[in-house]
Amino acid sequence: MMPPVAGGASATGAPPLDPAFGPASDVPILPPGTPLEIVKLDPDGAEVVRYPGTVLGLVDGWVVTEARWVNRTVQVGELPFQQGDRLIEWFSPSRPFNCFTVVDPESGRVRGWYANVTYPARFVPDATPPRIVWHDLFLDVVCTLDGRPALHDEDELDASGLSASHPDLHAAIVETAARVMRLATARALPFIASGWPERPGPGGPADR
């Protein structure tokens, strides 16, 4: 079952926080090169996978990390994930989505982006190693470098029954997915063709 939800959607359309995570936290100070453990939870809160990553830097409230795709090749819409791909992963303690930039390891060229609607990321900086936990919320936005964004997994959201059991959360998930679609279309942060800003730091196109 879906975990209990505290309150309804916020004024910005963000899904309410998972009460197990507590209130939104500040962006942790994690120096570039810090090794991490990244944990994905499914919509029910069960752990799906954990994998190693490394901090690249902080950009406009995002913690940007790097990981490698070590599984077999997977095709998601028009976007392939191939073994050895470099993943530049953007996590935020306040934004209700994350974004994985898929980079070809040989050419260094961005192949596309895979964004997940989520609860805001939970950071555990005092863990060994520091940990990022992200809690998936069904809908994904997939976009190739030269293509239009496409919405995925609407059938999973429909099958969840959230529209009846937690209508505010359901509405927030749909609204967040629409917002992510707009960002991807505009190639606004974090959907940038370079994959990673030349000068990490505050700024960049607003993701509002």
Image (cartoon, rainbow, N blue to C red):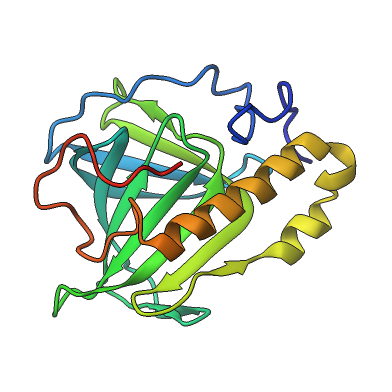
Image quadrant where residue 80 sits: bottom left
Asked if residue 177 shows in the view, the reply is yes
- Relative image position of residue 199 (x, y in whole percent): 9, 45
Q: Which residue occupies the extreme right position in the image?
A: 164
Asked if residue 42 shows in the view, the reply is no
Name the residue nearer the viewer: 100 or 45: 100
For the point 69% across and 43% down, the residue is: 44
Is residue 198 placed above or below 9 in the rendered structure?
A: below
- Relative image position of residue 161 (x, y in whole percent): 85, 49
- The answer to whether residue 90 is left or right of residue 96 is left
- Relative image position of residue 57 (x, y in whole percent): 18, 40
For the point 42% across and 19% down, the residue is: 25
- The answer to whether residue 103 is left or right of residue 91 is left
- Relative image position of residue 190 (x, y in whole percent): 33, 52
Report the label total: 0
Is residue 84 placed above or below 166 in the rendered structure?
A: below
- The answer to whether residue 203 is left or right of residue 26 is left
- The answer to whether residue 29 is left or right of residue 11 is left
